[in-house]
Image (cartoon, rainbow, N blue to C red):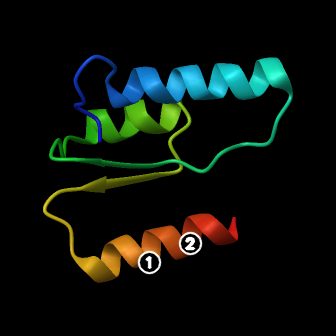
Amino acid sequence: DLQMPVLDGFSLVEKLRAFESYKGIAHTRVIMLTADALAETAQKARERGVDVFLTKPIRKKDFFSAVENVSES
């Protein structure tokens, strides 16, 4: 989720990408889920390395489709 206590979703993804780079490990697929449906937020997420950006409320089929698509990449 984008809005988590202590560490927001953007900061978490930035830390994850920095750790992957530092350790030379493979890209971890990230699906971000948030109530913030602004285009600017989605763009910010993509710039930070989010693979799939979903907004709430979410339908099960959309979530499962995102998981399936991100798993295949």
Q: Is residue 57 left or right of residue 18?
A: left
Say whether residue 12 is left or right of residue 4.
right
**Which is nearer the eye, 45 or 2?**
2
Q: Residue at x 58, y 64 (%)?
A: 70
Based on the displayed image, in which of its 4 quarters is residue 6 positioned? top left
Amino acid at circle 2 = Asn
Q: Disc 1 marks which residue?
A: 65
Question: Which quadrant of the view contains residue 3?
Answer: top left
Tag 1: Cα neighbours inside 10 Å, few (<14), some, or many (≥20)?
Answer: few
Q: Is residue 35 left or right of residue 64?
A: left
Residue 2 place in picture, x, y as percent: 29, 35
Q: Secondary structure at mark 2?
A: helix
Q: Residue at x 53, y 22 (%)?
A: 14
Q: Reply above or below: 58 against 62.
A: above
Q: Are marks 1 and 2 in contact (CB under 8 Å)?
A: yes
Query: Which residue position holds label 2?
Result: 69
Q: Report the amino acid beneath label 1.
A: Ser
Name the quarter where the N terminus is drawn: top left
Label 1's element?
helix
Residue 46 rendering spot, x and y as whole percentages: 48, 39
What is the distance, in whole Å, between disc 1 and disc 2 at their CAs?
Answer: 6 Å
Q: Which mark is residue 38?
A: none
